[in-house]
Amino acid sequence: MLPEIPDGYPQLLDALKARIREARVRAASSVNSELIALYWQIGQEILLRQREAGWGSKVADRLSGDLRSAFPNMRGFSKSNLMYMRKLAAAWPAGTIFPQLVGKLAWGHNRLLLDKVGDPAERCWYLQAAIEHGWSRDVLLHQIESGLCNRQGKAITNSERALPPLQSELALGLLKDPYNLEFLDMGNDFRERELHRGLVRHMRDFLLELGSGFAFVGDEYHLEVGGADFFIDLLFYHVRLHCYVIIELKPGEFRPEHAGKLGFYLSAVDDLLRLPPDGPSIGLVLCREKNRVVAEYALREISAPMSVSGITLKKSLPDGLRASLPTVEEIESRLRES
């Protein structure tokens, strides 16, 4: 028979479990950091001797064989991996902070950065973003392929004027232009309702594109104002900014009246939903097209924080190329004749 559980025991057990999990994570992180540091040092030695002593590329073959013979139970000493170690040392020179930062990412992440990102400044950006947001390897690959580095912080916005400095800085870092919605697999001819339904149906992909910290509250979110009914396209809450985020979808070109409607929704949400700890709600118009000058004028005198961004959908073939391709019927006919 088990002894009676004393008061406070479940809380103690939960606390100890949390500490054990944290310790295991720290231990795994420490092992990874040591491994990446070792790889960087090996790469640095290869790089140094190739530069100063004129060693050729074949030294990697010899070194790989000797290291694997000396450490038969240790993986990672193939010729290709040694060459990645050399690339790692070349990409992150000694004397900078980045050799220490790379140890915070798994080796697969580091190899991905070396393979996919040639520009040093962009590689640094993705390195720091992956560490900050805890991206998996697949998410990192997706962000690189979507060109996130060149889209982040590019939205047309009045946030610097409409928000307190700290919140404005965070908001600017989250907003991007354009938003990549290719996962919808929609052509260029679509209606607002189709875009709306597509985003709700693919909410997981949309949250990934929005970035970390967004929590989905609802679509066509109902508000009653002055006895009349209004519906917000998409409503989110951001856990780092501690505020609601309203997204309005426009399948065509941005028009100044879109900012006025969004300002109305922001005022209503601030009055009806916002709690004392929350910051000012933020609005975002996602539109198919926009004239930058028109959008900047539309936001200039608006005090509520809002932004305007474009969207990218499935890339369509140029008309000339599309016309030169056979139709489905032609392909089927040729298959029957063959």
Image: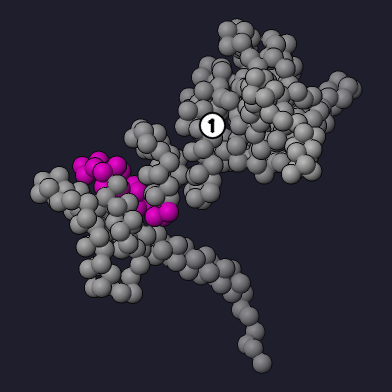
Quick check: 41 left or right of 166? left
Is residue 218 positioned above or below 317 on the image?
below
Name of the residue lying farthest toward the left: 53
Q: Is residue 31 visible?
A: yes
Prevailing secondary structure of the magenta residues: helix
Q: In which quadrant of the rendered view does residue 315 lie?
A: top right
Residue 230 image point, x, y percent: 83, 24
Residue 32 image point, x, y percent: 37, 60
User: What's the residue at 69%, 10% (across, down)?
Assistant: 256
Is residue 57 positioned above or below 332 on the image?
below
Quick check: 327 left or right of 293? right
Name the amino acid type tagged 1: Leu
Residue 91 among those drawn in magenta: yes
Q: In which quadrant of the rendered view does residue 303 lie?
A: top right
User: What's the residue at 35%, 67% (across, down)?
Assistant: 75
Q: Is residue 162 visible?
A: no
Name of the residue lying farthest toward the right: 227
User: Could you tell me which secondary element the residue under label 1 belongs to?
Assistant: helix
The residue that disc 1 covers is 174
Q: Is 225 in front, or is 254?
A: 254
Magenta segment: 88-108
User: What's the residue at 66%, 92% (across, down)?
Assistant: 1
Residue 195 image point, x, y percent: 75, 30
Local crowd size for mark 1, using a 10 Å CA cut-off: few (<14), some (14–19), many (≥20):
some
**On the rendered image, what quadrant is the C terminus found in?**
top right
Residue 337 image point, x, y percent: 77, 41
Quick check: 75 left or right of 303? left
Coloration of the structure image: one colour
